[in-house]
Image (cartoon, rainbow, N blue to C red):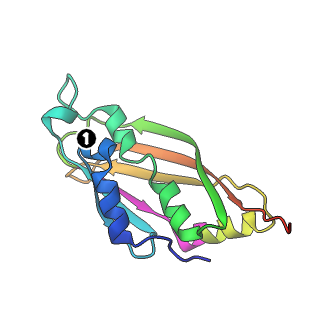
Amino acid sequence: MMKTEMNPNFFKLLLNVYPPYWGTGIVVKKISPDYKEIIVQMKMRWYNRNYVNTHFGGSLYAMTDPFFMLMLLQILGKEYIVWDKAAHIEFIKPGRGTLTAKFIITEEEIGNILKNTADGQKYLPEFSVDIKDEADETVASVTKILYVRKKIHSDS
């Protein structure tokens, strides 16, 4: 348990050539070896700005969409089911320039997941990430609720 399933550098490469990210200019800059931290950036480009010359709101959300789920899948391993269940995004100010989102999952959060799923029950942990601009000001705040459950094995 707690063994990552895929080399983080290879995983980063796969994400960076994934067409929806490549097409919106979203770049995974860092994946820690233990998958407990991921840093994602998106530069302002002609193809990812809206009518009022700011980043599209959908692109801001896309920066955050799968990362907590992907991190937990790697951290917890194949013995667990992990799905995105719900999300909320709050737009705080217009996003311009290069935007950054830093995803962190703590040991305490992992411990809570393990404790709350030990008997095969589902657990709905909540994670938050801020999208920040180059002045380190928050452009948007995203909250994700995940569905996590330990897989049940039959003896047959």
Quarter occupied by residue 57: top left
Residue drawn 30% across the image and 36% down it: 93
Q: In the rendered view, would you say 18 is above or below 14?
A: above
Magenta run includes residue 102: yes
* Residue 31 at x, y percent in the picture: 36, 67
* Residue 121 at x, y percent in the picture: 78, 58
Identify the residue at the far left of this view. 46
Quarter occupied by residue 76: bottom right
Q: Nearer the viewer, residue 7 or 51?
A: 7
Identify the residue at the far right of this view. 156
Q: Nearer the viewer, residue 133 or 123?
A: 123
Q: Does residue 135 appear left or right of residue 149 in this picture?
A: left
Q: Which residue is mark 1?
A: 23
Please give the range of residues in magenta: 99-109
* Residue 96 at x, y percent in the picture: 20, 39
Q: Does residue 156 appear left or right of residue 118 in this picture?
A: right
Callout count: 1
Q: Nearer the viewer, residue 140 or 22?
A: 22
Q: In the rendered view, would you say 153 is above or below 62?
A: below
Q: Is residue 97 visible?
A: yes
Residue drawn 21% across the image and 32% down it: 54
| Quadrant placement of the N terminus | bottom right
| Badge 1 amino acid | Gly
Magenta run includes residue 100: yes
Crowd band around label 1 with a 10 angstrom C-alpha radius: few (<14), some (14–19), many (20+) = few
Residue drawn 46% across the image and 50% down it: 66
Q: In the rendered view, would you say 127 is above or below 156?
A: above
